[in-house]
Amino acid sequence: MSNSQGAFVWYELMTPDPAGATAFYDAVIGWTIQAEGRAMSSGAEYREILAQDGQHSGGVLTLSPEMQQEGARPAWIGYVAVDDVDTTLARAVERGATTFIEPMDMEGIGRMAMLADPQGAPFYILSGPAVGASRAWQMMSPGHVAWNELNTSDPEAARSFYYGLFGWTDGEAMPMGEMGTYQMFDHAGQTIGAMMQLIRQSAPVPLWLFYFAVEDIDEAHRAIPANGGQVLQEPQEIPGGMFALSARDPQGAMFALVGPRKG
């Protein structure tokens, strides 16, 4: 998949306890996360995540007490590639988005901004050299994100917002009864995720939920509570014979897993 406008190119865990998060995700997903992070100009610390294939699949940003006092909470946030950060942000704000971080340049990476869609789900936009080099999203490659799922209070409004902003198009639609429609969306001719009605018991607020691929869903399932996490939804079979679950890490960030059942 081309990392052009509208591609997910990076995934970032914001956490107040990077050492604890490292131990947890190493046990559950099998990542290698840097033992020591690099200092950023903002004063925060950043650690990079390596998947089993040795490629980068994301990063870990340390939430300082000051950041938490300003409202930052443990969460996984995705980066979407754009051709022009400033122009895209202006268009997003016109469509009802809220700006969290104004456009800024990061040496060797590119230009970025953080915002929330009109329903409140946060995400980043990014342009520059890091966009073309990213392999963070890879379908069913262990340790990489395999699915991007938006849980939103207004699926139709969100669909209009993101399609207009990034050029995404409709993929397959799956009726879910009273829960509405599970609307998959495509980028560059490939299905990369879906949008669905927010279910409060699964996600308390609108958010992007990212599914990381694992080699054995049952092994990963057992590792979550064994390492201090909480399983929110037990493994369920999905189309294609894979199984998926959702969970919360020990620091409170929500994530999901997808993989085969080998037992």
Image (spheres, rainbow, N blue to C red):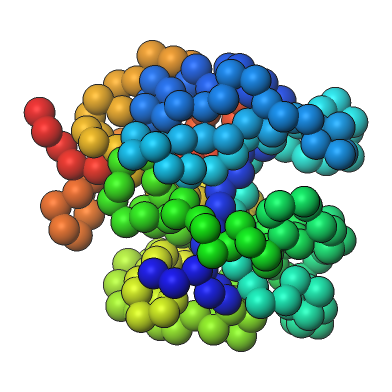
Q: Which quarter of the image is occupied by the C terminus?
A: top left
Q: Is residue 114 above or below residue 219?
A: below
Q: Quadrant of residue 6?
A: bottom right
Q: Nearer the viewer, residue 239 or 30?
A: 30
x then y, percent, for residue 260: 18, 42
x then y, percent, for residue 60: 62, 34
Q: Residue at x 41, y 65 (%)?
A: 193
Q: Quadrant of residue 62?
A: top right
- Left/right of residue 40 with respect to residue 150 in the rendered view: right
- Left/right of residue 31 with respect to residue 166 in the rendered view: left
Q: Residue at x 73, y 76 (%)?
A: 84
Q: Residue at x 34, y 20 (%)?
A: 223
Q: Which quarter of the image is occupied by the N terminus?
A: bottom left
Q: Nearer the viewer, residue 67 or 226?
A: 67
Report if residue 147 is visible in the image: yes
Q: Residue at x 69, y 54 (%)?
A: 109
Report if residue 250 is visible in the image: no
